[in-house]
Image (cartoon, rainbow, N blue to C red):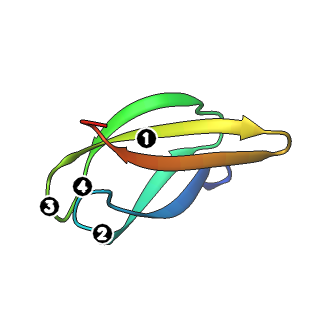
């Protein structure tokens, strides 16, 4: 995978609060489910474009 096509983002787990580093492809938008590497609970990631910037947020899957 080309490094120019990915972004590394650190998000706090919405369950355990631990910071987790994830790799996100530069053209990826929408929602996806990802498990926390620390507590194994599932997150709902939302990736949106806001003008020239992307907004990446993690929510509890049960929210």
Q: Residue at x 14, y 53 (%)?
A: 40
Tag 3 near tag 4, CB within 8 Å:
yes
Furthest residue toward top:
30
Viewer-nearest residue: 61 or 6:
61
**Mark 4 vs mark 2: which is more N-terminal?**
2
Q: Residue at x 18, y 65 (%)?
A: 38
To which residue does mark 2 refer? 17
Q: Secondary structure at mark 3?
A: loop
Q: CA distance from mark 1 to mark 2?
A: 15 Å
Categorize mark 1 by other alpha carbons within 10 Å: few (<14), some (14-19), many (20+).
Answer: some
To which residue does mark 1 refer? 45
Categorize mark 4 by other alpha carbons within 10 Å: few (<14), some (14-19), many (20+).
Answer: many
Quadrant position of residue 63: top left
Tag 1 near tag 2, CB within 8 Å:
no
To which residue does mark 3 refer? 39
- Image position, residue 12 (x, y; %): 39, 65
Q: CA distance from mark 4 to mark 1?
A: 11 Å
């Amino acid at each position: 995978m080309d490094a120019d096509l990915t972004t590394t983002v650190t998000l706090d787990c919405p369950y355990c609060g631990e910071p987790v580093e994830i790799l996100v492809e530069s053209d990826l938008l929408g929602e996806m489910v990802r498990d926390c590497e620390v507590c194994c609970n599932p997150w709902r990631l939302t990736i949106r474009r806001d003008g020239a910037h992307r907004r990446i947020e993690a929510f509890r899957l049960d929210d």
